[in-house]
Image: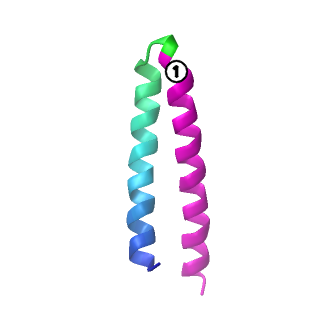
């Protein structure tokens, strides 16, 4: 995968994490667990992609 594609995906995930954080703040209690799980997964994917991109840039 090219650095440009990795960076684009990282930016997309960054925006998704921000959106989920806003949703979680405004969500009713019954929805918070579902949104929290989605947020956890998005954050993990974002961090994994960041590590990959950092490794690509160090070459």
Label tally: 1
Residue at 38% from the left image edge and 55% from the top image edge: 12
Q: Is residue 54 left or right of residue 20?
A: right
Residue 51 location (% of width, % of height) = 61, 66
Residue 8 location (% of width, % of height) = 38, 65
Q: How is the image coloured?
A: rainbow
Residue 16 location (% of width, % of height) = 41, 45
Query: For the view shown, which residue lies furthest in the bottom direction?
Result: 59
Quickly name the residue at label 1.
Answer: 32
Whether the magenta-drawn stretch holds residue 57 is answered as yes
Query: For the view shown, which residue lies furthest in the top direction?
Result: 29
Mark 1 lies on a secondary structure that is helix
Whether the magenta-drawn stretch holds residue 37 is answered as yes
53 shown above or below 30: below
Residue at 53% from the left image edge and 26% from the top image edge: 34
Question: Quarter-wise, where is residue 4 in the image?
Answer: bottom left
Residue at 38% from the left image edge and 47% from the top image edge: 15
Question: Quarter-wise, where is residue 41 in the image?
Answer: top right
37 shown above or below 7: above
Residue at 53% from the left image edge and 54% from the top image edge: 46
Quarter of the image with the C terminus is bottom right
Magenta stretch: give its range. Answer: 31-59
Along the line of sight, the residue nearer the viewer: 58 or 38:
38
Q: Is residue 58 left or right of residue 30?
A: right
């Amino acid at each position: 995968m090219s650095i440009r594609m990795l960076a684009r995906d990282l930016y997309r995930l960054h925006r998704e994490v921000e959106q989920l954080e806003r949703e979680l703040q405004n969500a009713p209690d019954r929805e918070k667990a579902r949104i929290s799980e989605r947020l956890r997964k998005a954050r993990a994917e974002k961090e994994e992609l960041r590590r990959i991109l950092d490794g690509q840039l160090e070459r």
